[in-house]
Amino acid sequence: MNVNPQKKVFTPIPQDTERVGKIVLDAAYKVHTVLGPGLLESVYRVAMKHVIESNGTIAEKEIKLPIMFEGVKLESAPRIDLLINKCVIAEIKSVESMKSRLRSPTLDLSPFG
């Protein structure tokens, strides 16, 4: 048997975390399909939280991520957009506009086009 000492071994993701991850992906797909691109991240964040919680899953928004440096808790802690079921982090991103070659087909399907 040839064992590669450089190969990393990963611990499997717990089933509950996988389940929550699927809920988040399904919510993102639904929100994007219904709302389309081009809105503010805050709109997508609220919509995602609504869809996730409608599945009976806990979603907290804009949670401070504590950062410790040399034993000191830094005040400028970054915020997590959504923390779902205390095990999955979702960062919401949006774009101001689509490239022109993508814009036309997208606007045809968008409720805002």
Image (cartoon, rainbow, N blue to C red):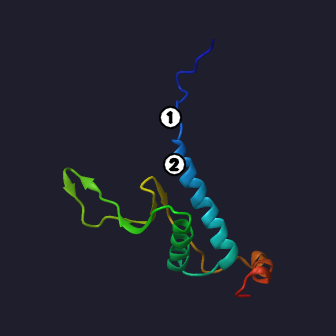
Residue 80, percent across and down?
A: 42, 64
Badge count? 2
**Res. 92 in view:** no
**The quadrant where residue 34 appears:** bottom right
The residue at the far left in this view is 71
**The quadrant where residue 67 appears:** bottom left
Residue 91, percent across and down?
A: 50, 64
Left or right, 76 with reference to 95: left
**Residue at position x 80%, y 78% from top?**
105
**Residue at position x 76%, y 83% from top?**
107
Q: CA distance from mark 2 to mark 1?
A: 13 Å
The residue wearing badge 1 is 11
The residue at the far top in this view is 1
Q: Quadrant of the N terminus?
A: top right
Query: Is disc 2 placed on a helix, strand or loop?
Result: helix
Classed neighbour count for the residue bearing mark 1: other residues with Cα under 10 Å, few (<14), some (14–19), many (≥20): few
Amino acid type, callout 1: Thr
Q: Quadrant of the C terminus?
A: bottom right
Circle number at residue 17: 2
The correct choice, above or below, for 48 with respect to 25 in the image is below
Looking at the picture, tell me which residue is in the foreground, 10 or 5.
Answer: 10
Amino acid type, callout 2: Thr
Residue 69, percent across and down?
A: 24, 53
Left or right, 35 with reference to 82: right
- Choose mark 2 or mark 1, whichever is in front: 2
**Res. 55 in view:** yes
**Residue at position x 60%, y 55% from top?**
22
For marks 2 and 1, the one nearer the N-term is 1
Left or right, 35 with reference to 43: right
